[in-house]
Image (cartoon, rainbow, N blue to C red):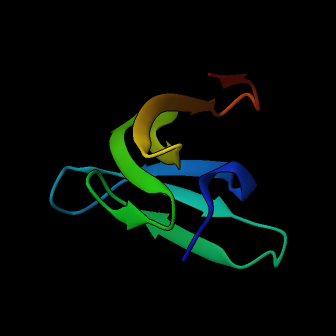
Amino acid sequence: GLVIEQLQLQGIARGLDGRWIAVVDNKTKRAYFLHEKDELYNGVVSKVLPDRIVYEVTAESGGKKTTREIIRKLSGETDQ
């Protein structure tokens, strides 16, 4: 599966159904098209907006599950 921390946002397009589609790649330079609610290796795509993608990352440590949000903007900035 795709690891969220390794993904780079390359672009965002609107699909024929009107939903936003994020175009991402990783170190293999292979393109992937992500939609809201797509499940990834360590989380899920929670939102795709015209200028950013929002991931919900789940991690387990010491028997406790924690969730955090990672936002990748088209400008290349990352908010955590």
**Which residue is at the far front?**
62
Tell me if residue 15 comes above or below residue 12 in the rendering. Answer: below
Query: Which residue does the image show at 60% across and 49% down from the upper left?
Result: 11
Q: Residue 16, relative to residue 53: is it above or below? A: below
* Residue at the extreme left of the image, as rendered: 17
**For the image shown, how many numbered marks are present on the structure?**
0
- Is residue 23 placed above or below 54 in the rendered structure? below
Image position of 4 (left or right of 76): left
Residue at 28%, 51% (x, y): give it. Answer: 36
Q: Is residue 48 left or right of residue 15?
A: right
Camera-side residue: 45 or 52? 45
Q: Residue furthest right?
A: 27
Res 58 quadrant in image: top left
| Residue 24, image x, y percentages | 62, 60
x then y, percent, for residue 33 = 47, 68
- Residue at 64% x, 74% y is 31
Q: Residue furthest top?
A: 79
**The N terminus: image quadrant:** bottom right
Question: Quadrant where the C terminus lies?
Answer: top right
Q: Is residue 51 visible?
A: no
Residue drawn at point x = 38 percent, y = 49 percent: 45
- Where residue 76 sits in the image (x, y, percent)? 76, 32
Q: Quadrant of residue 67?
A: top left
* Residue 76 visible in the snapshot: yes
Q: Position of residue 13 (x, y in %)?
A: 43, 51
